[in-house]
Amino acid sequence: MHDKKVIAIIPARFASTRFPGKPLVDLGGKPMIQRTYERVMAVEGWHRIVIATDDLQIKQTAEAFGAEVIMTRTDHVSGTDRCAEVLSKLSDTFDYVVNIQGDEPFIEPAQLMELAEGFKTNAPILTLIKKIVDADTLFSMNTPKVVVNQRGEALYFSRQTIPHLRGIPEEDWLSNHRFFKHIGLYAYRADILQEISRLQPGVLELAESLEQLRWLENGYTIQTLETEYETVGIDTPEDLVKIKKMGLV
């Protein structure tokens, strides 16, 4: 972790609108939250790993497999806010906080190491991006896209396909430009996390329903790092069916 003192926080809430109880869903004999936790545990160098939840059942399940759990308020609108509450409750001081969503049971430990590479730069916020290679992803409104400057800092995130390639047929876009999708894994400098958790949602965040736009609107720098690894998120019960068909569990 490059001599930084780093805490990994795994926010997990029961009341998902699209998939209630998702962290407790059975994946090949283990609850989803346990599989996520084990992926995080596979990386060395954490000073602490905490599951942050507002649900007693998730707390009991996580403690049963040996995880440290901190209960949080029920009214958080994002994992970032949940991470900030956990940080405020701890007496330890940390350099960086890494936010790994509890519904990422297939996250690659290598991705966490890639994110940790950014700690050397002391960037305020770090996140991963991946080159888009298929048209379905490129034009999916469920996949946030990102454009970056020459230093790899995020300029904007959108559910729309950005940038728009003027005068080029859409079927030729992938062969004419490198597009990136956002991988929703974040690291925040501890001082920055407390600052951004106090910000109010802005017009861009409300328009796109992407919390990272709140930070850009308020002038914070989000440093991106490119990954080659794919993530397989589980947002709906249908995703779970697909994953089982793929033989991942």
Image (cartoon, rainbow, N blue to C red):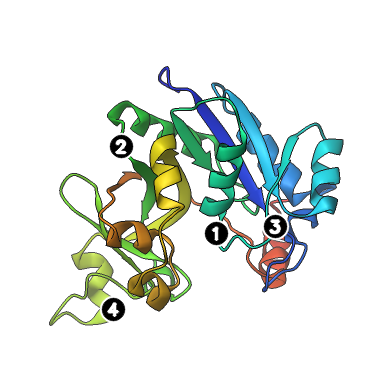
Q: Which numbered disc covers residue 171?
A: 4
Residue located at (31% from left, 61% from top): 146
| Residue neighbourhood size for the residue with mark 3, other residues' Cα within 10 Å, grouped as few (<14), some (14–19), many (≥20) | many
Q: Does label 2 or label 1 sit earlier along the sequence?
A: 1
> Would residue 239 be seen by someone viewing this image from the given angle?
yes
Instruction: Tell me the distance, in whole angstroms, between the alpha carbons under discs 4 and 2.
Output: 36 Å
Residue located at (29% from left, 51% from top): 220
Instruction: Tell me the distance, in whole angstroms, between the alpha carbons under discs 2 and 3.
Output: 28 Å
Estimate the x, y position of residue 239 in percent, counting from the top left.
66, 67
Q: Which numbered disc covers residue 123?
A: 2
In the picture, the quarter occupied by the N terminus is: top left
Left or right of residue 125: residue 156? left
Instruction: Tell me the distance, in whole angstroms, between the alpha carbons under discs 3 and 4.
Output: 39 Å
Q: Does label 2 or label 3 sit earlier along the sequence?
A: 3
Pointer 3: what residue? 13
Instruction: Tell me the distance, in whole angstroms, between the alpha carbons under discs 1 and 3.
Output: 10 Å
